[in-house]
Image (spheres, grey):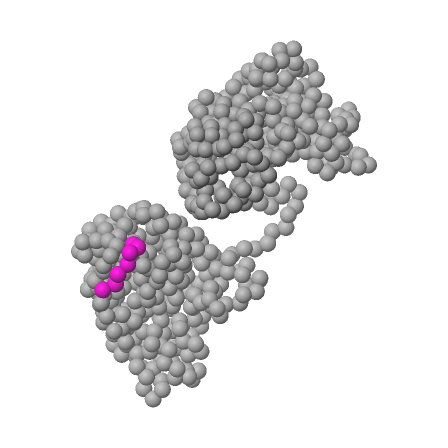
Amino acid sequence: MVLYLSATGDTKYVAELLAKKLGDESLDLIKRIRNNDNSVIRSKKPFVICAPIYVSYIPIFLKDFLSRQKFAGNRKVYFVFTSGGGHSGAAGAAAENIVRRKNMLFMGYADVAMPNNYMALKFIPAPSEEKINALLNDARYTILRTAHAIAQGKKIRTRHITYAESLATKALADFWKKHMQPSKAFYTTDKCIGCGKCVSVCPLNNIVLDNGRPVWKASCAHCMACIGNCPVEAIEYGSITQTKPKYNVRKYTGKNSNSSGTALLRRSGFVSLRPVDNFYQSSLFFPMPVVLVSTLTDDGKTTCGPYSLIAPFYVAGKDYYAFMLECRNSSNTAQNLIKNKKCVINFLPDDGGIFKECVRLGWPGDTPAEKMKDFAFHLEEGHRKAEDPAGAYPKVISEAVQAVECTWVDTLDGAQDDMPLAENADHYELEKYHDFNGITSPYGAHFVLKIEKILMKQKYRDAVVNGVRPADFPPLPVDYGYRDSKNFWYHKHSRMIPELLPQRQTTLSSVRYAADRLQTDVTFTDAALERIANVPRIFLPTVLKGCVKWAEENNVKVIDVKEMEIINDKRSKEKS
């Protein structure tokens, strides 16, 4: 259960979004606090207590309420703090102390930065709309990460708070409560309609109506609920708030917010950016691989050029698999592919020296001899050469973690007649350019590269065949291209994090229905069909047809568990 205390709506917004992501219910604590209601709160799921931060601490009245409150059911307790700075000070230590005194399990706390809504100090400016939208956008990601950790039952990492820091912060909070929270400065303007909203939202019952106008008593927490929730913005605090906008998160996230497309863009923080040439690096942050493509020169030597605009192209449903390479058509790589049609895509590991060499090799205009003169890597023959010793094939880079030997499919898109550039020409001038293969523009080229061989270092090959763990992934960098007219940028390899696929098991009757619709003499036992009950429904016919195809090829009439195990092992055997 998600419990929350919220004055101007920030913490309520966080709590309700958390509850939605966790599939749990939320409970507003203000009514309980106002009524001194400490009846037992029960929950089968962990308790998640969402609270604002007042002067680097839990609101004193909330701390006192939680200390008295009784909980039953689940013993795990998480805290989520909201604040204008995104830091909860010593609140985490206070929360842990409350939980441990109840003999419950403290699972840590998360900090969510929200717009600063404290309006009663001159030196704290009201946040701009741009700042508010940016903070709310970032907060959503923090909330989603927190919900993910809670759903998995993980402890949330917490900052260590020293005993001295905890004492000092508690003392400051007590001092602030006693000396810095006078309520006599609150008043209403002539806009007041006497609706009593301020009375109902005050967590300490500190406001009463007198002749239809609110009067503030002495027990004020300076939570700003009255100012933030006044429907006509009639409440002020001295002269400090007169020029400040009255903040309430519902203006930006709730039913009263503008739901037009433009407003939605403002709330999410997006602004438009015009795409220009080389948009992937000039108008986007586009993550790309770092590869060196080996090709053959006119004299049969291997030369290498760095590329990042390469992606899987044909991945299923064809007689072959293929990559798509996009490059400048006057480059050595493009010209060599047009002439010799063979290449190797070498995936290099994460290393600053390796990336530096890739950048050097990418300088436009250098001849293959100039590029390869001080080549920092080692070259070796690939498997195609081993199978065809008389053939001419580009070599593989020994330092690569994996390499893909390919052949350009020049017959696609009528590219078989493409010719090398004329001598001294730096681009093509054709009457017509291809759509997706060969010379596609005066300066661009695309190459559909049929995969002939996938070569991989032994440890990574074993991981692909047998299943991966985080440590089994190769350390591959991510390239972000040429920027600021000066640098190539890349991101270093970090740790791999697995995300468990949600299980949506199809009923056996549904799998049986799909199997019975196949036009075949091959039948399935119930036990065999149970093995594929986790397959998404949209893929089920394809999986069943694959099983039938195997059965027909092997003269099998009935597929049982034993046959399903053989079929499941088939892909692993094909890889190896």
The picture quadrant where one finds residue 180 is bottom left
The picture quadrant where one finds residue 394 is top right
- Which residue is found at the position 69% from the left and 14% from the top? 299
Front residue of 212/438: it is 438
Q: Quadrant of the N terminus?
A: bottom left
- Which residue is found at the position 33% from the left and 78% from the top? 199
Front residue of 81/457: it is 457
The picture quadrant where one finds residue 528 is top left
Whether residue 222 is visible, yes or no, is yes
| Vertical arrangement, residue 445 with respect to residue 80, above or below | above
Question: Residue 268 at what x, y percent from top left?
Answer: 51, 57
| Vertical arrangement, residue 238 with respect to residue 525, above or below | below
Question: Residue 295 at what x, y percent from top left?
Answer: 64, 22
- Residue 43 belongs to the span the image colors magenta: yes
What span is colored magenta in the figure?
40-46
| Extreme residue toward the top, this view | 390
Question: Residue 329 at what x, y percent from top left?
Answer: 70, 31
- Which residue is found at the position 46% from the left and 21% from the top? 458
- Residue 546 belongs to the span the image colors magenta: no
Front residue of 268/567: it is 567
- Which residue is found at the position 30% from the left and 67% from the top? 29
Q: Is residue 383 toward the left or the right of residue 43 in the image?
A: right
Front residue of 232/253: it is 253
Question: Residue 65 at what x, y percent from top left?
Answer: 23, 65
